[in-house]
């Protein structure tokens, strides 16, 4: 129970942030926020001993039990690792943001509410076992990401980037929902664990491949895989703490998480392996290649994130191969999933620190344009050291953690060549080659990032601000992350035992029954020269050469046609297709005249209802069962008709109100006639009060003017009114002539005295049987009353000042 | 009687829609008033008038009319009063602000979009 | 407008009490005979409107210094609270209770929680109607 509530703690804390911001403005709101992730890290860390043994902890809170939807907090190796990453990096990012965002200038309460909302959503994504709540939290991450990217909402680029990320990730989320629904139909459950249990049967279903592709679309859009990555560079308009948190360490890894989580279900499929591995490698290469085209520091990091996400994705794809190999736990195939999780952790550390450094550079110099930067090494030594550690790790150099996982990545890619199913013998050799080329570019952009910023001649005087080292508080978080980068290199096996192996077990439950069985020992030096080591040396050699000659060949990028890009495709779809063409078409009938809309709607309703009545042969008239007509009823009807006609054609407003009153009183007489004393009484009083009300309001309203209409509209108006009248008559006649089912009020008649202890059935229905209706009705009535009160008393002038 | 009432309801609706599609705000409000009368009678008609006594328990009477439509209409009457009042105030506030009660002139102009 | 018609004012005062007691009557009778919270509320409101017509808004406000917005709110709270009572007993929302008691003077009487709910309806109806009339009337 408490375990489930922990997911919502950030959301609950968010409720108090406006209060802290407004009332305790002397203390940066971030300090209050910081408590939340720190608490969560400690809380989740307490689970580590249990989980690392291979157990899982589950807690459930029912939400809509009748539909099988509940909040489930399922902690196994994978979700615990993610939870700790989310809360741990979250704590560091909040700490960093305290110094990054100015207490007096920024709307901090908004910022931290969005951030806490995201934290809640992300914890929900990784812990939900129920696919419906997983989807709910998934979309909540998209929404909070949208709000955070657009945080500086007065900038056009922020709004553009926010909208773009929202469009793409929410579209993907909808696809994923479709996949979830299909899966739930196949397995008759929303629970992922139960689905994994029935993986074998599901795989034979016809819709299996459709569900697979839909879910992958969700994962690929979220994790910025090719060709959906285009939202991530534009998302860099967000404040840097957000980029470090959402767009490198956590949210974009939700797609990775999803692929890892569903691997046990889909690993048996050939499409899964090809798609995940292929798209992953393509993204890796594409991202690393185009990172060098960027001139914005955060742009470089965005593309590098895209590329690194591709790397992890491809590893997960290769990891699925292990499903097809007998005794895979003893072969080379076992490395892929392990490497994926290992690199995921490493990436969070080094990329997080690099983002924070980019933020510091931006903060202290006023620009992120790498062409203007340079020579900051002596001015910002600490930042430089951190950036160096991060970049070297990203490039895959020892003694940093990136080296270890990069080696394992190469091992995994090499393993594909040994796989004999699905044509991998012919095409498999391409995989390590592509991986190697991508790694060369990764090396180059890592160097490009750090050395173009911190070394070189530099034009320090021409920068917008005079640069100096960042305040200590701002440096704490990146330094911690950089320290982790180094520490992880020296104690990889400790991390492996407590975090990676349990997570691998969650991805490949078909291979292992306890984390202890995973026989992988991470080592920097294997005792002999391996292929991977040779490949790394090759990367460094070629990378260095290309980096030093970068200025000579960087012009290559200009050769790419600037019009044929994915970004232009997106712009075309959104702005040309939707805004202009579709918008232009709807402009033809959306003229802005409400009366016109109303006549369209009413006309359409009556035509379709009348047509349905005749097509379905539902229109019948019968005199059987009709009550006889009496003379006084005829008189009443004549009065009613005359009153109505007078109301419509009255020349003065007094006449029409009096005629309306006449109609109302006649209606109440009808109620008397039809044995409805309650209605008659109510109608009588209401009519009296209404007339009084109209007369009161007349004081404020103008006199009737002669209506001048264009003939065309007058004709349409008459037509629509006649059509609606005809529809109502036909429906009433049909309803009278064929009573398909008896009235449900028999029950009320029988039980009114025994169960409800009343005599007036109408009143008992109102207050007892259908009390809910009445409760809502008086609520609506109160809203109307308060709205009227508000409209009259709380008047605002045009400029928004109170009169 | 039900057959005749069906035509009466249709007539009320027709008149109401005709008024609602007019330009003057007050006519539109009166139209909604007529519309609710029509709707109330329609619900009652569709529920049939069978039964010879009001739906109130008393000695020796079992042939009640159907109470459910009446309960629905009772709430509808009160709600339509609230809505009419709301419309009236909305209309005259709009008239004060915009200096017109003509729907065609109220269409959002450039400066207050 | 300040009206000063003594005959109307005198009659209105009398009639007001007659209508008001009639309203109270149909409110309480509502469970067994025609009437109930809606009608009762409306009749009460029309009695107050009659006073307003005979005197004027300001005078009526000094006679009946009621904040109708509060009346609406208390009616809503009463209705919601009555509906929620049964939840404390573990029954579904909106379960009503009733029983028969022998009260002094009145004799055998049935007491309903539904009547409390109806009282909420009554208060809301009176409150809203009077809020509307009063605010429109006050508006210059």
Image (tube, coloured by chain):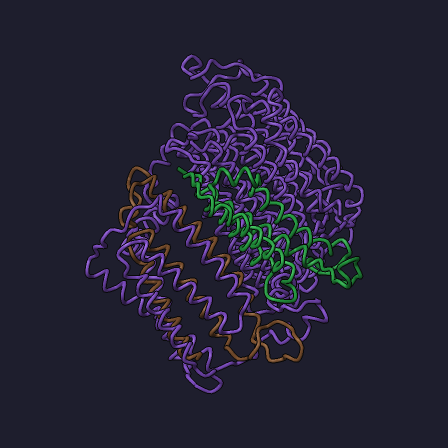
Chain colours: A purple, B brown, C green
On the image, the x and y values in percent for residue C112 come to 72, 60
At 69% from the left edge and 30% from the top edge, which residue is drawn? A35
Name the residue nearer the viewer: A648 or A84.
A648
Q: Is residue B28 left or right of residue C37?
A: left
Q: Quadrant of the C terminus of chain A?
A: top left
Specify whether residue A266 is in view.
no
Going 59% across and 77% down the picture, which residue do you hit?
Answer: B64
Q: Residue furthest bottom?
A: A624
Residue name at image x 57 percent, y 39 percent? C65
Vertical position of residue A241 compared to residue A661: above or below: above
Q: What is the total number of numbered labels drawn onto the structure image?
A: 0
Task: State the image coordinates of residue A226 (x, y, percent, origin top left).
Answer: 47, 47
Which sits in the foreground, C118 or C101?
C101
| Residue A120, picture quadrant | top right
Tell me where residue A787 appears, x and y as whole percent.
48, 44
Provide residue C52's location: percent of width, then percent of height: 48, 45
Q: Residue A185, relative to residue A560: is it above or below?
A: below
Q: Is residue A337 above or below residue A158?
A: below
Asked if residue A630 can be seen in this view, the reply is yes
Return the residue nearer the eye: A495 or A1.
A1
Left or right: A75 in relation to C46 = right
A709 up-or-down from A118: above or below: below
Q: Quadrant of residue A84?
A: top right
Specify the farthest residue to the front: C7
Lateral position of residue A598 relative to residue A748, left or right? left
């Amino acid at each position: 129970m408490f375990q489930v509530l922990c997911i919502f703690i950030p959301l609950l804390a968010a409720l108090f942030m406006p209060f802290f911001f407004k009332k305790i403005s002397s203390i940066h709101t971030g300090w209050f926020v910081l408590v939340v992730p720190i608490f969560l890290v400690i809380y989740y860390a307490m689970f580590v001993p249990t989980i690392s043994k291979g157990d899982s902890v589950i807690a459930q809170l029912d939400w809509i039990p009748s539909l099988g939807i509940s909040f489930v907090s399922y902690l196994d190796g994978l979700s615990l690792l993610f939870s700790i990453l989310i809360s741990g990096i979250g704590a560091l990012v909040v700490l960093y943001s305290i110094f990054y965002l100015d207490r007096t200038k920024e709307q901090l309460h908004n910022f931290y509410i969005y951030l806490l909302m995201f934290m809640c959503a992300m914890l929900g994504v990784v812990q939900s076992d129920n696919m419906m709540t997983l989807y709910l939290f998934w979309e909540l991450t998209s929404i909070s990401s949208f709000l955070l990217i657009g945080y500086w909402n007065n900038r056009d680029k922020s709004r553009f980037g926010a909208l773009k990320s929202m469009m793409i990730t929410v579209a993907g989320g909808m696809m994923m929902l479709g996949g979830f629904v299909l899966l739930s139909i196949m397995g008759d459950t929303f629970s992922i664990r139960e689905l994994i249990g029935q993986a074998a049967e599901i795989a034979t279903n016809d819709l299996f491949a459709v569900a697979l592709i839909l879910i992958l679309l969700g994962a690929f859009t979220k994790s910025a895989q090719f060709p959906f990555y285009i939202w991530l560079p534009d998302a860099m308009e967000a404040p840097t703490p957000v980029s470090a948190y959402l767009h490198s360490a956590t949210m974009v890894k939700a797609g990775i998480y999803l692929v890892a989580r569903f691997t046990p279900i889909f690993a048996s499929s050939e499409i899964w392996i090809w798609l995940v591995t292929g798209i992953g490698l393509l993204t890796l290469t594409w991202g690393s290649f185009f990172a060098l085209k960027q001139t914005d520091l955060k742009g470089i990091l965005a593309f590098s994130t895209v590329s690194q996400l591709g790397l992890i994705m491809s590893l997960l794809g290769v990891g699925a191969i292990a499903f097809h190999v007998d005794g895979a736990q003893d072969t080379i195939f076992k490395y892929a999933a392990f490497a994926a999780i290992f690199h995921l952790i490493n990436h969070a550390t080094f990329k997080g620190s690099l983002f924070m450094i980019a933020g510091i550079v931006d903060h202290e110099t006023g620009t992120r344009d790498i062409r203007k930067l340079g020579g900051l090494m002596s001015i910002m030594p600490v930042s430089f050291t951190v950036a160096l550690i991060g970049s070297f790790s990203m490039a895959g150099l020892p003694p940093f953690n990136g080296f270890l996982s990069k080696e394992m990545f190469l091992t995994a890619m090499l393993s594909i060549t040994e796989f004999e199913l699905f044509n991998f013998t012919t095409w498999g050799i391409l995989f390590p080659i592509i991986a190697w080329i991508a790694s060369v570019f990764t090396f180059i952009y890592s160097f490009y990032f750090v050395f173009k910023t911190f070394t070189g001649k530099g034009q320090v005087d021409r920068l917008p601000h005079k640069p100096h080292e960042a305040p200590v508080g701002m440096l704490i978080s990146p330094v911690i992350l950089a320290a982790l980068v180094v520490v992880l290199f020296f104690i990889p096996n400790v991390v492996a035992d407590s975090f990676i192996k349990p997570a691998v077990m969650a991805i490949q439950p078909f291979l292992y029954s306890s984390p202890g069985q995973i026989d992988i020992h991470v080592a920097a030096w294997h005792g002999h020269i391996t292929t991977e080591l040779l490949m790394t040396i090759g990367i460094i050699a070629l990378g260095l050469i290309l980096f030093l000659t970068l200025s000579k060949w960087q012009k290559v990028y200009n050769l790419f046609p600037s019009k044929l890009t994915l970004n232009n495709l997106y712009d075309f779809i959104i702005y040309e297709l939707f805004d202009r063409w579709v918008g232009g078409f709807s402009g033809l009938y959306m003229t802005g005249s409400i009366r016109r809309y109303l006549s369209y709607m009413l006309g359409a309703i009556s035509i379709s209802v009348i047509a349905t009545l005749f097509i379905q042969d539902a229109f019948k008239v019968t005199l059987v069962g009709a009550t006889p007509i009496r003379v006084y009823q005829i008189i009443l009807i004549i009065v009613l008709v005359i009153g109505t006609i007078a109301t419509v054609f009255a020349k003065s407003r007094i006449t029409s109100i009096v005629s309306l009153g006449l109609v109302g009183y006649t209606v109440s007489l009808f109620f008397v006639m039809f044995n409805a004393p309650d209605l008659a009484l109510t109608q009588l009083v209401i009519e009296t009060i209404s007339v009084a009300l109209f007369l009161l309001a007349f004081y404020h309203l103008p006199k009737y003017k002669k209506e001048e209409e264009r003939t065309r509209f007058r004709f349409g108006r008459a037509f629509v009114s006649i059509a609606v009248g005809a529809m109502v008559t036909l429906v009433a006649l049909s309803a009278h002539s064929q009573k398909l089912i008896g009235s449900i009020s028999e029950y009320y008649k029988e039980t009114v005295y025994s169960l409800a202890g009343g005599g007036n059935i109408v009143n008992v229905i109102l207050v007892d049987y259908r009390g809910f209706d009445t409760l809502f009705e008086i609520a609506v009535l109160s809203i109307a009353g308060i709205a009227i009160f508000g409209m009259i008393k709380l008047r605002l002038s045009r400029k928004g000042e109170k009169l | 009687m039900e057959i005749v009432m069906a035509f009466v309801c249709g007539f009320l609706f027709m008149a109401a829609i005709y008024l609602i599609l007019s330009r003057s705000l007050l006519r539109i409000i009166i139209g909604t008033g007529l519309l609710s009368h029509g709707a109330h009678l329609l619900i009652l008609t569709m529920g049939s008038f069978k039964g010879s006594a009001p739906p109130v328990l008393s000695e020796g009477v079992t042939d009640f009319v159907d109470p459910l439509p009446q309960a629905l209409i009772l709430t509808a009457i009160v709600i339509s009063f609230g809505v009419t009042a709301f419309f009236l105030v909305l209309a005259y506030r709009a008239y004060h602000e915009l200096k017109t009660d003509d729907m065609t002139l109220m269409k959002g102009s450039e400066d207050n979009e | 407008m300040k009206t000063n018609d003594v005959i109307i004012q005198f009659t209105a005062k009398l009639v007001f009490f007659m209508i008001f007691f009639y309203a109270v009557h149909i409110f309480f009778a509502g469970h067994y005979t025609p009437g109930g919270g809606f009608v009762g509320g409306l009749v009460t409101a029309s009695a107050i409107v009659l006073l307003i017509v005979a005197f004027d808004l300001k005078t009526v406000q000094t006679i009946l210094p009621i904040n109708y917005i509060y009346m609406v709110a208390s009616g809503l709270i009463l209705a919601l609270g009555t509906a929620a009572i049964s939840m404390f007993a573990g029954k579904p929302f909106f379960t009503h209770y009733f029983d028969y008691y022998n009260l002094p003077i009145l004799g055998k009487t049935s007491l309903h929680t539904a009547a409390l709910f109806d009282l909420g309806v009554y208060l809301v109806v009176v409150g809203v109607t009077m809020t509307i009339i009063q605010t429109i009337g006050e508006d210059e």
